[in-house]
Image (spheres, rainbow, N blue to C red):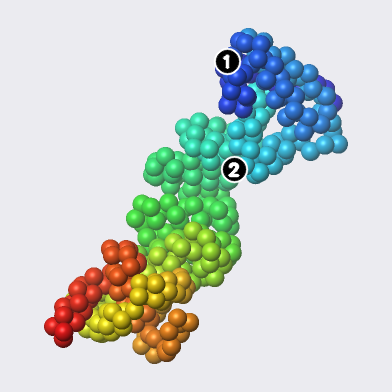
Amino acid sequence: MEQQTFTIPPSAFDSTLLPASSRTPGTPDFREAVSTFLHSQFQSFGGNVTLLVDDQRIAVMWSPDTTRPKPLEVVVAKLQQGQMAEGIQLLELLLSREPDDVDVLYNLGIALSDAGKLESAEGYLRRAIELAPEFANGFIALGVALSRQQKNAEALEALESAVKLEPENPWARRNYGVNLLKLGRHEQAAEQLLQAVMLQPEDQPVWVALGDALRLVGKARDSERAYSRAIALNPHNDFAEAARQGSTQLAQASFEKKTGGSIRPEAVQCCVASIKEFSSMSDEQVQAIVFEIALQGRSGFDVKNPEKKYRLKSKAGEFTGLQLVCSMYVGFQRISPGADVGFDLSREYEAAKAQVQREG
């Protein structure tokens, strides 16, 4: 295959990829460091490479090895391994030879977007969809880059185009739904996110977003199911924690709705019982109980159903979800006053303290 040449000016080279002592363009150390870096990178492509680095240009003359993966495939693999700066530099070099290569424009746009260089990312992605107006993934990537810049109306337009181009694309539905949610269009968001989870049922972040959308339109039971599904997919990451927080908000809203915003007497009595129980315990004993409740509560407590019971290792008996939540709240006021336990029982707690004081 004929030799390929890639050329960029020295100012377009990311000097952070070089040793600190070799980052000044125009110096022998800079020229040598750039040559060393590019020679090493092009070795991963296979074939033969010749380099020319002077004050006017950085040129790579490369004769490909047709038995090896294409350069773009190698670069994408680097990006997937977290080598962002190296990958971006190589993509920019590849683009210097073929500035209208849609695949390079697309991958460069995604890499820059993930690296936080959003304006540059937007420019490359707009060029990609200009050259390939039927490229749904290009519209998705553009929508994400725009959303990250808080250009939500423009992002929505790009993502809507992606959905129209590929209605069965789960990433299009997912990002379109999330953007609708950000704009407060909760019912439409729920519709799109439901489509997304049907297309890709193992996508945990979509289940969390669907739970949020359903909660905001008042479909509490469906919202709780979505949060539960998200937690079940992976209970030990940030998405699961977001689902738990959403579930707690559901419980709090139900609590307030049931009481009409007034103090709930049964919660006051649960707090009274916990205050009295903890008064004879050390901080260490209270902490053991509270931390166990908090850990178990990561899967959610049903505070609305007095028939459902839970057990603890740190103390005997069976307890309702409301009893455990009240115990956790009271306990945290003892060992860490003011801590946010994700459930507001401040009024019930104050009423319980007053009752305990009156009773002596």
Q: Indicate the position of residue 74 as horizontal and vertical percent values.
A: 73, 38
* In the foreground, 330 or 227: 330
Q: Which residue is mark 1?
A: 24
Q: How many marks?
A: 2
Q: Residue at x 53, y 52 (%)?
A: 172
Q: Indicate the position of residue 191 as horizontal and vertical percent values.
A: 45, 63
* In the foreground, 72 or 157: 72
* In the foreground, 133 or 64: 64
Judged from the image, the secondary structure of the residue bearing numbered disc 1 is loop
Return the residue found at the far left: 358
Q: Please tell me in which quadrant of the rendered image residue 254 appears.
A: bottom left
**Quadrant the C terminus occupies:** bottom left
Q: Label 2: how many residues lie within 10 Å, few (<14), some (14-19) or many (20+)? A: some
> Would you say residue 322 is visible in this rendering?
no
Q: In the image, which disc is placed on residue 172?
A: none
Nearest to the eye among marks 2 and 1: give it.
Answer: 1
Q: In the image, which disc is placed on residue 135?
A: 2
Q: Residue at x 82, y 37 (%)?
A: 68
Q: Please tell me in which quadrant of the rendered image residue 85 appears.
A: top right
- Amino acid type at image mark 1: Thr
The answer to the question of whether label 2 and label 1 lie on touching residues, with beta carbons closer than 8 A, is no
Judged from the image, the secondary structure of the residue bearing numbered disc 2 is loop
Q: Indicate the position of residue 335 as horizontal and vertical percent values.
A: 33, 68
With respect to residue 199, does 266 lie above or below?
below
Q: CA distance from mark 2 to mark 1?
A: 40 Å
With respect to residue 164, does 264 lie above or below?
below
Q: Residue at x 39, y 56 (%)?
A: 181
With respect to residue 50, does 345 lie above or below?
below
- Amino acid type at image mark 2: Phe
Q: Residue at x 83, y 28 (%)?
A: 47
- Mark sitting earlier along the chain (2/1): 1
